[in-house]
Image: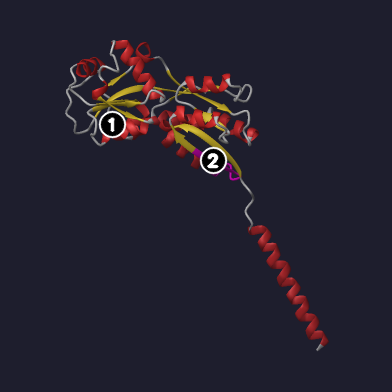
Amino acid sequence: MKRIGCLLAALGLVLCLNACGKTAQETPEEKTEITVFAAASMTETLQEIKTRYEAEHQDVELVFTFDSSGALKTQIMEGAVCDLFISAAPKQMNELEEAGLLAQDSRIDLLENKVALCLAPEGGAAIASFDDLAQALAGGEILFAMGNADVPVGQYTQKIFAYYGIDEAAVSGSITYGSNVKEVVTAIVEGTADCGVIYATDAAAANLTPVDTATAEMCGQVIYPAAVLAAAPQGAATRAFLDYLAAAPAAEVFTAAGFTALG
C-alpha cells in the first residue's frame, strides 16, 4: 500500500510539473505597444503596414488613432499618450516642435501627397477643373465640400481659394465642412455635396477619379512629416518603426496608394 501511495504521489508530481510547464509555455509574452497618432488620410496604408510589421515583429503591437492632424496635435499638447505622430501638413508638427514635444533628431519628411478636386459620382456638376470650381462657387451654383480651417486638407483648400481670389466667407452658403478628410470624402461619395477637395490617395481609396489636381503654386507641397514624441513610452521601439516607415517595404505600400515616399 505504501508503494502504491508513493507511486501515486510521484505521478501527481509529474502531472503537476507538466501542467506548470505547459502554462509557462502557453503564456504569451507581453508585447511592446506603440501608439501612433496619424492623419486620417493614412488609414488604409497604415492598416496594411500594421499587418506586415506585426507579422515580422511579433513582440510589437501597433495601436493607431486616425483623425485630422489638428485634432491629434491638440490631444498631444493636452497630454495624450503618444509614441509617434504623423501629420498631413508641417504646420501641426511645427507647433509641437516649438513646444518642445518632439524627440531630438527624430523628425523626418515621410511622404508627399496631392490635393485633388473630385465630383460626386451621380452629381452631374459641369466642373472639369479648379477654374470651373472658382466660377461655380462665385455663381452659387454648387454645394462644395471641404475640410474645416483646422484640418490640413481644409487649409490647403483655403490656399487654393486665395490663389483664385475666392472670399470663403462670401461663398460660405455653398460650402459644407468636414472635421477630417474622410468626412469630406463621404460627402462626395454619398452625393450630399456636388464636389469637394480631398487628397489624391483618398480619392483612389474611394474609387473617385479626380477631375483636377492642385499644383504647388496653388497650395504648396503636401508634405507629411513624422516624428517620435519626446515623452514616448516606447522611444526605442518607435524609432525602429519610424525607420521601417522610411524604408523600401513601407514605401511600396505608400506608393501603391498614390503617395510619393520621401524617406
Kind of residue at badge 1: Leu
Rendered location of residue 20, percent (x, y): 70, 64
Task: Read off the magenta span.
Answer: 54-64
Rendered location of residue 215, percent (x, y): 35, 14
- The residue labelled by disc 1 is 208
| 118 sits left or right of 247 in the view | left
SS for dot 2: strand
- The residue labelled by disc 2 is 62
Point out which mark residue 197 bears. Answer: none
What residue is drawn where x is 62% and y is 53%?
A: 28
Place residue 7 in its image quadrant: bottom right
Rendered location of residue 157, percent (x, y): 34, 20
Q: Is residue 60 magenta?
A: yes
Which residue is farthest right? 2
SS for dot 1: loop
What residue is drawn where x is 50% and y is 29%?
A: 74
| 143 sits left or right of 58 in the view | left
Q: How many marks?
A: 2
What residue is drawn where x is 38% and y is 31%?
A: 179
**Within 10 angstroms of label 1, few (less than 14), some, or many (20 or more) residues?**
many
Q: Is residue 207 visible?
A: no
| Rendered image coloring scheme | secondary structure
Rendered location of residue 240, percent (x, y): 61, 32
Kind of residue at badge 2: Leu
| 12 sits left or right of 155 in the view | right
Q: Looking at this view, is 50 or 33 the one in front?
A: 33
Q: Are marks 2 and 1 in contact (CB under 8 Å)?
A: no
Report, in whole angstroms, how far the alpha carbon at label 2 lies from the one at label 1.
Answer: 29 Å
State whether residue 176 is above or below residue 169: below
**Within 10 angstroms of label 2, few (less than 14), some, or many (20 or more) residues?**
some
Q: Is residue 34 magenta?
A: no
